Image: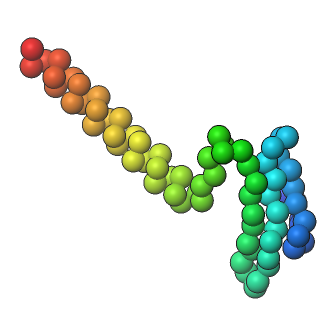
Amino acid sequence: MLALSRKANESIVIGNDIKITVLEIKGDQVKIGITAPKSVPVYREEVYTQIREANKEAASDTVQENLKNLFKK
């Protein structure tokens, strides 16, 4: 992991099209802004984890249903 120090209104750039800017620092919270192409999804980690788990569950359910349907015939 790369660790960088930034102050308010300073940025880092990832690749050619992603820019992360520190907008505000209040106590133990940091507000950041992310500029990225619409084709790049940006999620909070806990939301991303929930999406991944839901996708795994849906895929598993779909596979099980498809297998059941194959053996019904």
Above or below residue 49? Residue 28 is below
Left or right, residue 35 beside residue 12: left
| Residue 5 visible, this orientation | yes
Answer with the quarter of the image where residue 11 lies.
bottom right
Q: Is residue 2 visible?
A: no
Q: Quadrant of residue 34?
A: bottom right
Query: Measured along the vertical axis of the image, is residue 53 above or below residue 67?
Result: below
Label total for image: 0
Task: Say which quadrant the C terminus sits in.
Answer: top left
Question: In the image, residue 71 lies at what x, y percent?
Answer: 13, 18
Locate residue 41, reporting x and y percent.
62, 47
Report the residue at 63% width, 52% height from top. Answer: 42
Nearer-the-camera pick, 58 or 39: 39
Furthest residue in direction bottom, as rendered: 27
Q: Residue furthest front?
A: 38
Q: Position of residue 28 (x, y in %)?
A: 73, 80
Residue located at (79% from left, 78% from top): 25
Say which residue appears at 46% left-offset and 49% top-offset: 51
Q: Residue at left 85%, top 40%?
A: 16
Q: Nearer the viewer, residue 47 or 18?
A: 18
Would residue 64 appear left or right of 72 to someone viewing this image?
right
